[in-house]
Image (cartoon, helix red, strand yellow):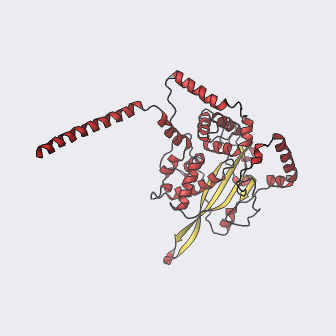
Amino acid sequence: MGYVAVKGGTLAIKESIKSLKFERLKSGTVLETVKIEAGMRGLIDQVMSESSLYSPMLAAIAIKQAEGNPEEAVFLLRAYRSTLPRKHYSRIADPEEMQIERRISASFKDIPGGQVLGATTDYTHRLLDFDLVTETEQDAVQWVNAYLLESKQVNESNRTERFPKVLDYLRKEGLMAECRNDDREPDDVTKKSLEFPSSRSQRLQILTRGQTGAVTSLAYAVIRGYGALHPTVGELRLGSLPVYIDDPVDEMKEEEDSYYIGEIKVTEAEMLIPVTIQKGNGKEEIEFEIGYGICYGQNETKAIAMGILDNSLEKGNAEYPTQDEEFVLYHIDSVESTGFISHLKMPHYVTFQSKLDSVRKTKKDEGMTDGKEADTNAIKI
């Protein structure tokens, strides 16, 4: 269930909302949404992923309105999303068609097409850059122009080349089982409430919508010993996926008659999880299972964590909380969990007074009982 603030005391609420706006504007500086969109890429991507709505512009507005609070921004964006009509369903997006910006494998040193490091903080020193204090827009323009001139050929090559999947080579060697196509229509958790046991499509949707920190924490718990061995990144790729829709008039037309409507930036992770299989004559063999994660924008930690939890939930061993789908899926949702915790700030006068009355009555009864015991003891003495 979702909790929303209950209004009461109209004048006080109006003044509270004015105070909120004052806190946002009192410095005399107004953040332009285009600058939020341009300079807060990581936050934009996180909010879009948790909101299930791909729109950097709308995410920037939500972040500005929420004063940078990601939970509030997600709440705002999901609320807006619920008002939008669903006019079309896209064709299945194939990650092999991704225009790569970044592609790495932690499992192999050399992969077909090579490792593409792309833009990442993984190799930075994580030291505060105080030059950012005096950085100007003119400095930014000059640096970008010089960078584009220097890397023009490399960028053009990466935009056109399609990279094969790393895990396909393991399958060709017989080291991984072939994936069977599941042509069933996926469930939609935004249209129909989650039911248990859940389908994999439901689990993946909730994982990609899940609060980034919560998904990461539970995946970390899996690695620490709650149900899995050490996983390895088979392939992590970041890039733009083309999106196509069928002919709105004649949906029976062939795939080549579909319409290209744009592209979305996504992060995809395919995780390799080693498992020990018992064979005949008491022999054991190691095989690899896969865990899958994909989410909007550059959200690598979350995509990897998704892959770990995807595999963990497939096992479904209730002995471990990280394999209990109800425990995981109900508690990672940002709006649900934040809403429930935040509702505790709302008036609970009636229920609390009832509890107080119960405590007072209990104390009074205990006092009377203690008094009688004291009188009895006095008589005995």
Q: Residue at image x 52%, y 41%?
A: 336
Which quadrant of the figure has residue 379?
top left
Residue 129 image offset from top left, x and y in percent: 74, 49
Residue 261 image offset from top left, x and y in percent: 74, 41
Q: Residue at image x 50%, y 35%?
A: 3
Q: Residue at image x 26%, y 36%?
A: 364
Residue 199 image offset from top left, x and y in percent: 53, 50
Compared with 168, 361 (above or below) is above
Compared with 129, 28 (above or below) is above
In the image, is 47 to the left or to the right of 9? Answer: right
Compared with 130, 27 (above or below) is above
Q: Nearer the viewer, residue 358 or 37?
A: 358
Determine the residue located farthest toward the bottom in the rendered image: 281
Determine the residue located farthest toward the left in the rendered image: 380
Which quadrant of the figure has residue 53?
top right
Q: Nearer the viewer, residue 177 or 48?
A: 48
- Number of marks in picture: 0
Residue 4 image offset from top left, x and y in percent: 52, 33
Compared with 114, 89 (above or below) is above
Q: Residue at image x 82%, y 53%?
A: 155
Q: Nearer the viewer, residue 368 or 230?
A: 368
Q: Is any part of residue 258 visible from this angle? A: no
Q: Is any part of residue 141 visible from this angle? A: yes
